[in-house]
Image: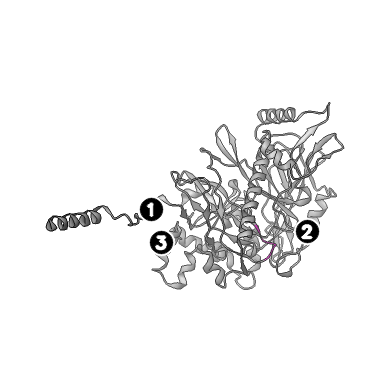
């Protein structure tokens, strides 16, 4: 009997080793099934944007974007209340034929400017991207939508100007009394630590929005930019799912592998050296001077900034690009996992060329970060989530207003609960900073206005209006507070020529009525 019992015990032990004991942990999930942090991809549009000069309609993705990711930024954040959290969004990746997540960022807004976030808009061909933009806070509550501006014929700097110390600002059209007038290009006197973003237009489904020129911070001091993430299409996100962010872009290394996608109004970083990407419209950032379809304020500033210490800085950037274009082994890895494997096998001095992203903790402790970090408590992290929800709601409101859709009742009730109603001289009942309008008897109803907007789009195409229209948007949750810059630096005054044109005090030449190219 004893022998039989011992035999059963041996058999049970063998089977537990074969099939796994009750307390044994399952194998790890294959990495291909998990979110993948990228060492390449789009840069958050609120952090930096190339300036498109041709004002084209946005790219179209064939598939609907997934629901937004609930992000949980790391406890470390830039020290100071001037840094605000701006959540991420989905970007279409043509190579993967899928969406990637452009993670959120900590950002110092430009002084007295408000952020209007971009969105994906449903169109017959799929889903079209409508870019975000910075706009003066004084104008953010009532945005003017304009006809298509005429095409700019001459945007490059004059060769024989004899000016070597300034930055060339391209020409721009201004809308005055029902037609466009041209402001010629000019030489700007630069300011250390400040990037001038010139006046330009951004496309929307309802018309073109004039973005007045403004001073922005240099790229390295704007804040913290989290790395993009790819979520596999079949990756299951359960209710209440949040993704913890922890890997950031090393902004100081961006100049080595930086690209522009003008039609998408995005910068890209990483391995976009193949001619395949040129065919998509993704170009090396320095080619704005030869293609003339966009303007790069960051490159223009950096070339001026390095003129004293590295006189051939721009030639060096072009040379480094050519080396990576011709030798794929010099290009940065595409994912953080691949980066971690490759970096350990190369000399320390060469690692910066590959390491576009790194863990936030190591970045915060290193000397690369130009600002100090502080730790958030649980309450502050909850406030970040609340801000995320507020900005995403604002994004949806903008989409409904510009596409001629009725604002959902849930959003209307949310806005109505925040502020008292006010009457306007035109007989409209408007929420302060809101899109909700109720009319007195005899005035056009909201449904009638929406019908008119849809008919305008169908009759004249995307943004193909022939006159201007002002529309109310809610107050943006992201706004620069004052003219006080970082580290005690005051924002420079705006160029006199820009001020003169915006006041309507100059008429250099007429561009005729909008709507023609």
Residue visible at 49% across and 49% down? 277
Secondary structure, mark 2, is loop
Q: Identify the image quadrant of residue 25.
A: bottom left
Residue bearing mark 3: 329
Q: Secondary structure at mark 1?
A: loop
In screen coordinates, is 53 left or right of 347?
right
Task: For the N terminus, give its image quadrant.
Answer: bottom left
Which is more toward the observer, 110 or 305? Answer: 110
Q: Identify the disc placed on residue 244.
A: none
> What residue did someone put label 1 on?
29
Q: Position of residue 133 (x, y in %)?
A: 67, 49
* Magenta span of residues: 80-84
Note whether 54 is above or below 27 in the view shown: above
Mark 3 or mark 1: name the one nearer the start of the chain.
Answer: 1
| Side (left or right) of 9 relative to 371 | left
Q: Earlier in the sequence, mark 1 or mark 2?
A: 1
Magenta stretch: dominant secondary structure: loop
């Amino acid at each position: 009997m004893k022998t039989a019992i011992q035999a059963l015990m041996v058999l049970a032990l063998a089977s537990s080793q074969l099939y796994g004991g009750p307390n044994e942990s399952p194998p790890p999930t294959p990495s291909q099934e998990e979110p993948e942090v990228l060492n390449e991809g789009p840069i958050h549009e609120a952090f930096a944007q190339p300036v498109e000069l041709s004002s084209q309609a946005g790219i179209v993705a064939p598939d609907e974007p997934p629901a937004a990711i609930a992000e949980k930024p790391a406890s470390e954040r830039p020290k100071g209340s001037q840094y605000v959290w701006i959540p991420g969004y989905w970007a279409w990746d043509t190579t993967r034929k899928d969406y990637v997540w452009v993670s959120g960022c900590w950002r110092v807004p430009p002084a007295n400017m408000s952020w209007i976030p971009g969105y994906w808009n449903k169109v017959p061909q799929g889903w079209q991207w409508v870019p975000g933009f910075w706009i003066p806070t004084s104008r953010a509550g009532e945005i003017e939508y304009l006809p298509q501006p005429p095409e700019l014929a001459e945007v490059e700097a004059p060769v024989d100007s004899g000016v070597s110390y300034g930055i060339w600002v391209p020409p721009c059209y201004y809308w005055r009394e029902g037609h466009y007038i041209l402001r010629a290009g000019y030489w700007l006197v630069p300011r250390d630590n400040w990037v001038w973003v010139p006046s330009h237009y951004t496309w929307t489904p309802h018309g073109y929005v004039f973005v007045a020129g403004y001073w922005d911070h240099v790229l390295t001091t704007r804040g913290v930019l989290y790395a993009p993430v790819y979520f596999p299409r079949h990756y299951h996100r359960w209710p209440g799912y949040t993704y913890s962010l922890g890997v950031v872009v090393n902004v100081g290394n961006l100049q080595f592998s930086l690209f522009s996608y003008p039609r998408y109004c995005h910068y890209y970083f990483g391995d976009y050296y193949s001619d395949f990407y040129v065919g998509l419209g993704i170009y090396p950032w320095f080619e704005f001077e030869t293609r003339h379809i966009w303007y790069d304020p960051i490159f223009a500033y950096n070339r001026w900034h390095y003129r004293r210490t590295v006189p051939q800085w721009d030639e060096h950037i072009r040379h480094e690009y050519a080396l990576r274009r011709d030798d794929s082994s010099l290009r940065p890895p595409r994912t953080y996992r691949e980066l971690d494997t490759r970096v350990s096998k190369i000399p320390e001095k060469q690692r910066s060329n590959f390491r576009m992203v790194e863990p936030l903790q190591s970045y915060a402790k290193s000397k690369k970060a130009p600002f100090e970090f502080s730790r958030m408590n649980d309450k502050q992290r909850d406030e970040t989530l609340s801000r995320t929800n507020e900005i995403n709601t604002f994004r949806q409101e903008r989409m409904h207003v510009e596409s001629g859709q009725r604002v959902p009742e849930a959003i209307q009730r949310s806005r109505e609960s925040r502020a008292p109603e006010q009457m306007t001289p035109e007989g409209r009942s408007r929420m302060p900073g809101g899109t909700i309008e109720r009319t007195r008897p005899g005035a056009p109803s909201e449904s009638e206005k929406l019908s008119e907007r849809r008919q305008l789009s169908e009759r004249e195409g995307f943004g193909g209006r022939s006159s201007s229209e002002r529309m109310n948007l809610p107050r943006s949750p992201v706004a620069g507070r004052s003219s006080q810059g970082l580290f005690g630096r005051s924002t420079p005054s705006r160029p006199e020529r820009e001020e003169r044109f915006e006041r309507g005090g100059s008429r250099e030449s007429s561009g005729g009525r909008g709507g023609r190219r």
